[in-house]
């Protein structure tokens, strides 16, 4: 029988490159001075000097912008592509971007346009005296309007696009890729590397590669944005900018990745197979959803949870051109962490942040460094959890300390966590969820996952008591000044060891009289019983009645 492949065995000595980098960067551009209805009136009256704050003025600005886009495309021989419903935009633009990449010339490659729903200012005429000039009120509404996608090839970032809405207040979207930026910085520095699709397979100097990835931040992205906003046609003018009407950037979706490249593909496949096998029934059932009223950081949420907390394993025969097989996901609120095998050779861990609030960060672009640091910490905690889970062994002193009542260093009683106790086993199974390694544990989140597991009701008092005995046994640690706990290595080993032994050893062995039990297992008890009876008779010991 072949040995079980464990995560620590594969990670130790078989990874040739380990790099953390921003991956996809998707940003919102908005004009801060045009976000409330009163500011619309100020823009039309105070800035443009219009006697009537009429939507007709906004329509004129939009028409002028659309005409300038057409003239820009014609003057620079740029193809304009209409995006139809159901069309995958990147598939249409990929050949054009590839051609631009071969030339290496910074340029607008193509302009796509489509009718899309956007949040824009909607004007309504107010009931006023007909003898007086008309008056309008403005309210934000979702309307189907024209949007332009400026696909560019940039000397620093490679492929990217800037999307501009043609209607007031002209929201903007920006899409970039951190790996593509890092590749160009290495090429400029003359450092050799081998590409992985959307990543790196090898590098002459891994330390320099990581330093380059660490360097990408808000300043570099802002320079890119300003450079292209000075080149493409826009609905706002230089006079508007001088008056304070210009775009600022905020984070819409940020992907922070960690890629572990293995020395040979079979090690990558073995690693991921072991990872998936251990997550099918250990802390990651097929679909587990846990709804919270508090954020995973333990703070009271300002509104409804607004998303689903769950862990899931998605099986697909083909996830995309760069990914095959299985993706392991951990979702919380609007964001998630995903793991998959990249090009069959590397493990990719990505924290996909769809709302910076999920990580306790503000949305403005200058907070990107803080968000990236927290997302990298999530990737690291997830990997450490899986390493502890795969190579989990409890030595006798640790097992005795946890399974029996004891005293803490300051003399407080630490209740035992007896193996086999239904509530303790349910608690271990709940803590084995990898989601807790990402979000931490609160009383409410523990109760949400424990409800129904022990077969009886589970109260808040019981959740508080269980957290207390976990803390006193040194399995979890409280985050200072917050009602949030994190699992430490002993806590991970406790949860996974108890769950593995119960679910994968004891439960199958105790099912020997069931029809689904393997023949060797069904035949074992009679053989053992005969051997025990023989030894009792040889020792002249009476058999128990």
Image: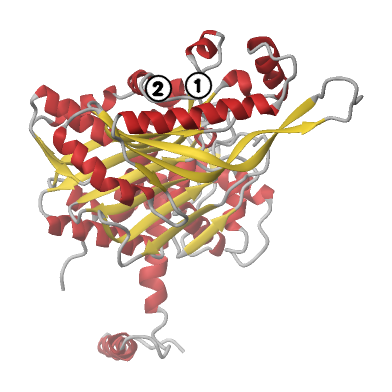
Badge 1 marks a residue whose secondary structure is loop
Real-space CA distance between mark 1 and mark 2, rounded to the nearest whole angstrom: 10 Å
Specify few, some or many for label 1: CA neighbours under 10 Å numbering under 14, 14-19, or 20 or more.
many
Q: Can residue 41 be seen in this view?
A: yes
Which numbered disc, 1 or 2, marks the residue closer to the eye? Answer: 2
Q: Which of 530 and 70 is in front in this view?
A: 70
Looking at the rendered image, the quarter that the N terminus falls into is bottom left
Specify few, some or many for label 2: CA neighbours under 10 Å numbering under 14, 14-19, or 20 or more.
few
Please determine whether, in this image, residue 26 is positioned above or below residue 458. above
Q: Position of residue 261 (x, y in %)?
A: 17, 45
Q: Can residue 362 be seen in this view?
A: no
Q: Mark 1 points at which residue?
A: 247
Q: Nearer the viewer, residue 503 or 347?
A: 347
Q: Judge from the rendering whether residue 295 lies leftward or rightward of residue 85; answer left or right.
A: right
Q: Where is residue 126 in the image (x, y as percent from the top left)?
A: 84, 30
Q: Nearer the viewer, residue 58 or 20?
A: 58
């Amino acid at each position: 029988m072949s040995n079980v492949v464990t995560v620590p065995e594969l990670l130790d000595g078989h990874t040739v490159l380990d790099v953390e980098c921003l991956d996809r960067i998707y940003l919102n551009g908005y004009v801060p001075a045009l976000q409330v209805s009163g500011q619309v009136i100020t823009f039309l009256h105070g800035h443009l000097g219009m006697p009537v704050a009429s939507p007709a003025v906004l329509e004129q600005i939009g028409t002028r912008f659309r005409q300038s886009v057409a003239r820009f495309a014609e003057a620079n021989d740029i193809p304009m592509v209409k995006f139809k419903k159901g069309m995958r935009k990147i598939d249409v633009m990929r050949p054009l971007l590839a051609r631009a990449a071969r030339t290496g010339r910074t340029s607008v490659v193509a302009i796509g346009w489509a009718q899309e729903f956007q949040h824009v200012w909607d004007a309504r005429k107010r009931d006023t005296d007909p003898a007086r000039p008309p008056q309008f009120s403005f309210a934000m509404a979702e309307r189907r309007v024209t949007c332009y996608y400026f696909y560019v090839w940039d000397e620093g970032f490679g492929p990217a696009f800037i999307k501009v809405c043609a209607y007031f207040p002209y929201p903007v979207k920006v899409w970039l890729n951190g790996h593509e930026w890092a590749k160009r910085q290495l090429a400029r520095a003359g450092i050799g590397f081998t590409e992985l699709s959307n990543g790196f397979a090898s590098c002459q100097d891994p330390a320099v590669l990581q330093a380059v990835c660490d360097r990408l931040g808000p300043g570099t992205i802002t320079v890119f944005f300003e450079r292209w906003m000075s080149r493409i046609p826009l609905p706002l003018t230089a006079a508007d900018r001088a008056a304070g009407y210009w775009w600022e950037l905020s984070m819409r979706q940020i992907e922070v990745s960690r890629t572990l490249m293995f020395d040979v593909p079979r090690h990558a496949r073995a690693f991921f197979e072991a990872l998936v096998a251990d997550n099918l029934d250990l802390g990651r059932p097929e679909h587990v959803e846990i709804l919270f009223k508090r954020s995973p950081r333990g703070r009271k949420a300002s509104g409804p949870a607004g998303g689903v907390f769950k862990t899931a394993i998605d099986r697909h025969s083909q996830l995309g051109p760069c990914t095959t097989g299985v993706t392991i996901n951990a979702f919380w609120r609007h964001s998630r962490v995903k793991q998959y095998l990249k090009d069959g050779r590397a493990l990719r861990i990505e924290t996909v942040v769809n709302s910076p609030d999920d990580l306790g960060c503000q949305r403005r672009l200058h907070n990107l460094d803080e968000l990236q640091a927290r997302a990298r910490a999530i990737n690291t905690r997830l990997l450490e959890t899986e390493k502890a889970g795969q190579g989990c062994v409890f030595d006798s002193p640790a097992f005795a300390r946890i399974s029996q009542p004891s005293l803490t260093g300051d003399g407080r009683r630490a209740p035992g966590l007896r193996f086999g106790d239904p509530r303790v086993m349910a608690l271990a199974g709940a803590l084995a969820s990898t989601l807790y390694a990402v979000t931490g544990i609160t009383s409410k989140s523990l109760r949400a996952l424990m409800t129904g597991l022990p077969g009886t009701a589970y109260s808040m008092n019981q959740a508080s008591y269980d957290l207390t005995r976990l803390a006193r046994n040194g399995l979890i640690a409280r985050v200072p000044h917050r009602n949030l706990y994190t699992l430490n290595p002993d806590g991970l080993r406790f949860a996974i060891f108890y769950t593995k032994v119960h679910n994968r050893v004891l439960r199958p062995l105790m099912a020997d009289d069931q029809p689904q039990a393997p023949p060797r297992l069904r035949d074992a008890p009679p053989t053992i019983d005969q051997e025990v009876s023989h030894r009792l008779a040889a020792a002249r010991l009476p058999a128990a009645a």
